[in-house]
Image (cartoon, helix red, strand yellow):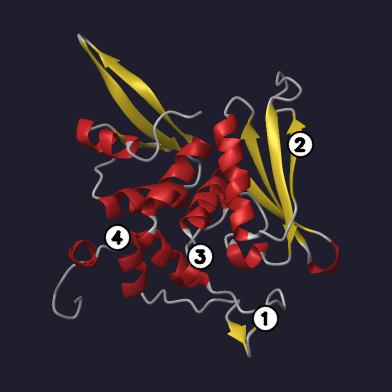
Amino acid sequence: MAKEGHTATEVARLTGLPRSTVRDWLQGGLPRSANEPSNGVCRRCNGGGHEFSALPAEYMYALGLYLGDGCISAHRRGVYRLRFFLDARYPGIIDECEDAIRTLRPENKVSRRLRSGGYTNSSDGSHVEIAAYSRSWPCLFPQHGPGRKHERPIRLTDWQHELLVRHPKALLRGLIHSDGCRFINTGRNWRHPRYSFSNLSGDIRQLFCDGCDVLGIHWTIAPRTVYVSRKHDVARLDEFIGAKV
């Protein structure tokens, strides 16, 4: 399409792909997955070949949570620990996170532990840590790496792009549940709901915008924050996100 004269924006609209994906591909960014199986064995975790294309919507929800509130740490014998730090005020999100991990690794134990928050005035038990061990976490979450996420590039692999197009609602739900909110925006003689998503990483903010683009949801951006404000777009997000519980 580009060779025929279409711009990246036009190609994105015609194919339903995020604009950033089309832009990366047109610039030659067609990475081969580092964990493609060789003879049915993953070169990264030495496990069975992963069927990334078969991953369910719960994976995209977990990815959204991971990008905001998750981390992966290495342990002995090639095992990794995936952890999410969630606000104890929202038990529904905590349950949904745990269910998503169990869906991805039904044979692995998932632990839940009360923690204090990251601020000096945080009370004990204000947060819940959801954790599970697996050799495959870096394969499933290739955004894992040294340093803080907002200080390094965060890019989706080809198979993650395909899952984004297939399950944009799940990704947006996970992102909002980690670093977003639904609130009432007010003005002179008017008030209506609005969504916002804030993250220090411009790449992660762009992923939120990409998910909205797939669904045809209009967004606006301010420094470090993306807003969805139009009534019909807010109503669309309400269909699968709504207020945190």
State the residue position of label 4.
Answer: 19
Image location of residue 106, percent across then percent down: 66, 59
Residue ID at (74%, 25%): 125
Q: Is residue 48 visible?
A: yes
In terms of sequence position, does the residue under pointer 2 or pointer 4 come before the other? Answer: 4
In terms of sequence position, does the residue under pointer 1 or pointer 3 come before the other? Answer: 1
In terms of sequence position, does the residue under pointer 2 or pointer 1 come before the other? Answer: 1
Q: Is residue 79 left or right of residue 162?
A: right
Residue ID at (59%, 64%): 140
Q: Residues within 10 Å of mark 1 (few under 14, many from 20)?
A: some
Q: What amino acid is found at the position of numbered circle 3 in the picture?
A: Leu
Q: Residues within 10 Å of mark 4 (few under 14, many from 20)?
A: many
State the residue position of label 1.
Answer: 43
Q: Secondary structure at mark 2?
A: strand
Q: Residues within 10 Å of mark 2 (few under 14, many from 20)?
A: few
- Do tag 1 and tag 3 residues touch (Cβ < 8 Å)? no
In terms of sequence position, does the residue under pointer 4 or pointer 3 come before the other? Answer: 4
Q: What amino acid is found at the position of numbered circle 1 in the picture?
A: Arg
Q: What amino acid is found at the position of numbered circle 2 in the picture?
A: Arg
State the residue position of label 2.
Answer: 113
In terms of sequence position, does the residue under pointer 4 or pointer 1 come before the other? Answer: 4
Q: Is residue 41 left or right of residue 157?
A: right
> Quadrant of the rendered structure where residue 229 is?
top left
State the residue position of label 3.
Answer: 55
In terms of sequence position, does the residue under pointer 3 or pointer 2 come before the other? Answer: 3
> Quadrant of the rendered structure where residue 146 is?
bottom right
> Quadrant of the rendered structure where residue 36 is?
bottom right
Residue 17's label in the rendered image is none
Toward the front, the furthest residue is 107
